[in-house]
Image (cartoon, grey):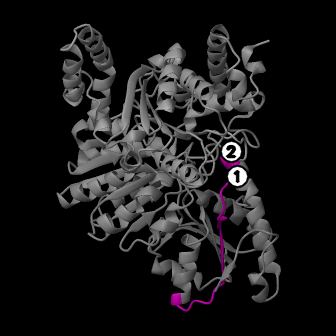
């Protein structure tokens, strides 16, 4: 029987011999490679976490002691040793295990936490809660060197350092990478720590030798100990942590389980906040991952990846870069995932990766714009949420010419609730002066990006995850909107961005039921085009379809525009219900929430066949939709 099969929980790890633990580490790596290669997910980070995770669970007592992961995609090993190994083959599959910690899965999971740089703040609050309640429990927060590039992590450290009696251990998993190489001054400093681990050895040697000299030796040692900071700065410059008042242990070889256990036991016994600096290698133990130059298999990439939305953007931005010397690009530790690597290769001096620091990225972009450049800020749509204040008051208030490109918008699926880009269009609708575009296909990505960078004020472009949709050519244009289909004036279907293809499917189905249908794509969804409002007045029903939350989304804004113009056409807005969506493939999630051609056509048919307008206010077949007249 394999060792892993005998591990039903963390307590079982404490019963294993060193030889069994070595075998277990190898088995875990085999399971990670086999499973994640099939299901997709974060392979490299977890291969580097095996020994650290085993040490954490052997030294601390989960779930009494609380283990927090930042970012949660490093928690696969944690799942395997907390009773979920039999289900691990279902990772990231519909109805299976989440790709992140999940409270519903296990009492050992505390926070879902798939947005980086947040675990230390959770840990600060949790440790303070236990202190106030008089509970003798430790909190352990695992954060990568990439996560430490986020400003929120340093806000937390500043507060943690002021609370001298918190039973809080912070493990810095230092592999020199987030997705790709960790960047910035912090990365340089941690590199110096990794390459100069001599301080403790030197101090111990001095202590032993001085102790042999009576009378003079001990006082001399105390003098040397008093200049500890200077010695540390010379031999192992960990002063950035100790200047905050935090006890520092390390650097420790993170793939040496025994060394990690020893360091964690020392940290546990200290009685206050301690940082344990563990040096690891992303992808450790799997040669293909170790040698992968792009991201050490941070995520498994398909062998024959089809051309995606990101690829279209990437190529177009390079073309724009050649035409426009003032165009620069910014991302937050997402150079390859957002497609900026191609622009970076062509224009390295015009590309800025600021680390996991979305707020800084946006305000820095404002500064670049004020300085006469046109920045293109590339983020996942879900991470735009983190920099809303900077977008509103640093960019928009100053009318800065900054273009935001939001990748993975709408339903993204496999990575679960925190990664669905379902909030961006709602929050961007509130920003004065911002123009928002939602391309329906690859050709429109190119077209709308080119238009966006020509505008003086703030603009945003959002598109879906995965394979780019086939181009849908327009047959006409009304104002700035493309007319995609026209067969009558019963139903006006407004397909937003990636949902334009769904609107075309709905239109065809409605035609088969005898309805006259016109399908339009607004292209620019903010502000609402007056020509679209005028067009709506010619129809019996206007239907909007978007892969954004319905609250405050494009459908709501179009309905408001009709009310303001006293256009009486009823509106039905279909979108994502305001709830956190479980992980599943995008198509499966859309099916679950009713955003498919068949389901939408059925509901619209029922609406059109009901008598008068009163029935339009009723919820159709339990689907969350509402009438805005």
In which quadrant of the rendered view does residue 281 lie?
top left
Q: Position of residue 353 (x, y in %)?
A: 32, 41
- Residue in the image at 51% along x and 89% along y: 564
- Residue in the image at 82% along x and 79% along y: 609
Q: Is residue 347 left or right of residue 91?
A: left
Q: Between residue 413 and residue 364, name the one nearer to us.
A: 364
Q: Between residue 529 and residue 289, name the one nearer to us.
A: 289
Q: Which residue is under mark 1? A: 589
Q: Which residue is under mark 2? A: 585
In which quadrant of the rendered view does residue 89 lie?
top right
Residue 419 higher or lower than 241, as above or below: below
Which residues are drawn in magenta?
Answer: 564-587
Q: Is residue 162 left or right of residue 547?
A: left
Residue 307 higher or lower than 505, as above or below: above
Contact between labelled residues 2 and 1, with CB atoms less than 8 Å apart:
yes
Q: Position of residue 82 (x, y in %)?
A: 70, 31
């Amino acid at each position: 029987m394999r060792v892993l099969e005998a591990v039903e929980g963390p307590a079982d790890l404490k019963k294993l011999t060193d030889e069994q633990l070595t075998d277990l580490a190898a088995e875990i790596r085999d399971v990670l490679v086999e499973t994640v290669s099939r299901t997709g997910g974060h392979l490299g980070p977890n291969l580097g976490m095996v020994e650290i995770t085993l040490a954490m669970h052997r030294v601390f007592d989960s779930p009494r002691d609380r283990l927090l992961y930042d970012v949660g995609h490093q928690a696969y090993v944690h799942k395997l040793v907390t009773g979920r190994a039999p289900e691990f083959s279902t990772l990231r599959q519909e109805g299976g295990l989440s790709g992140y910690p999940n409270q519903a899965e296990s009492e050992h999971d505390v926070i879902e936490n798939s947005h980086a740089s947040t675990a230390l703040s959770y840990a600060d609050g949790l440790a303070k809660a236990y202190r106030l309640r008089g509970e003798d429990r430790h909190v352990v927060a695992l954060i990568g060197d990439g996560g430490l590039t986020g400003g929120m992590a340093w806000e937390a450290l500043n507060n943690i350092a002021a609370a001298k009696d918190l039973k809080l251990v912070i493990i810095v998993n230092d592999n020199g990478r987030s997705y790709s190489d960790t960047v910035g001054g912090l990365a340089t400093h941690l590199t110096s720590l990794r390459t100069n681990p001599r301080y403790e050895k030197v101090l111990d040697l001095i202590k032993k030798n001085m102790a042999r000299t009576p009378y003079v030796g001990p006082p001399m040692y105390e003098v040397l100990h008093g200049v500890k900071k200077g010695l540390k700065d010379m031999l192992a410059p960990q002063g950035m942590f100790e200047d905050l008042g935090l006890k520092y242990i390390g650097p420790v070889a993170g793939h040496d389980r025994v060394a990690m256990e020893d360091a964690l036991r020392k940290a546990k016994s200290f009685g206050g906040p301690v940082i344990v600096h563990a040096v690891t290698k992303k992808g450790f133990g799997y040669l293909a991952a170790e040698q992968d130059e792009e991201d050490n298999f941070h995520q498994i990439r398909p062998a024959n990846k089809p051309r995606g939305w990101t690829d279209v953007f990437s190529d177009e931005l390079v073309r724009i870069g050649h035409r426009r010397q003032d165009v620069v690009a910014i991302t937050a530790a997402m150079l390859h995932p957002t497609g900026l690597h191609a622009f970076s290769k062509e224009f390295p001096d015009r590309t800025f990766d600021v680390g996991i620091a979305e707020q800084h990225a946006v305000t820095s972009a404002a500064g670049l714009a004020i300085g006469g450049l046109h920045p293109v800020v590339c983020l996942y749509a879900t991470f735009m949420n983190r920099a809303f204040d900077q977008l509103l008051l640093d960019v928009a208030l100053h009318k800065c010419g900054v273009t935001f490109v939001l990748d993975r918008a709408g339903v993204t699926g496999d990575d679960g609730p925190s990664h669905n880009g379902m909030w961006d269009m709602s929050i961007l609708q509130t920003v004065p002066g911002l123009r928002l575009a939602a391309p329906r296909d690859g050709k429109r990505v190119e077209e709308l990006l080119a238009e966006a960078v020509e505008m003086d004020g703030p603009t945003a472009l959002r598109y879906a995850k995965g394979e780019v949709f086939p181009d849908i050519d327009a047959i006409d244009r009304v104002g700035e909107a493309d007319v995609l289909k026209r067969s009558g004036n019963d139903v006006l279907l407004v397909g937003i961005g990636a949902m334009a293809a769904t609107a075309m499917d709905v239109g065809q189905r409605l035609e088969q039921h005898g309805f006259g249908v016109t399908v339009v794509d607004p292209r620019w969804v903010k502000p609402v085009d007056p020509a679209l409002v005028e067009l709506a007045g010619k129809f019996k029903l206007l239907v909007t379809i978007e892969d954004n939350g319905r609250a405050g989304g494009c459908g709501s804004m179009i309905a408001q525009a009709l009310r303001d113009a006293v256009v009486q056409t009823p509106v039905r807005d279909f979108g994502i219900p305001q709830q956190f969506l479980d992980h599943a493939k995008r198509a499966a999630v859309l099916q679950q929430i009713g955003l498919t051609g068949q389901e939408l056509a059925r509901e619209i048919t029922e609406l059109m066949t009901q008598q008068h307008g009163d029935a339009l206010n009723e919820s159709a077949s339990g689907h969350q939709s509402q009438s805005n007249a």
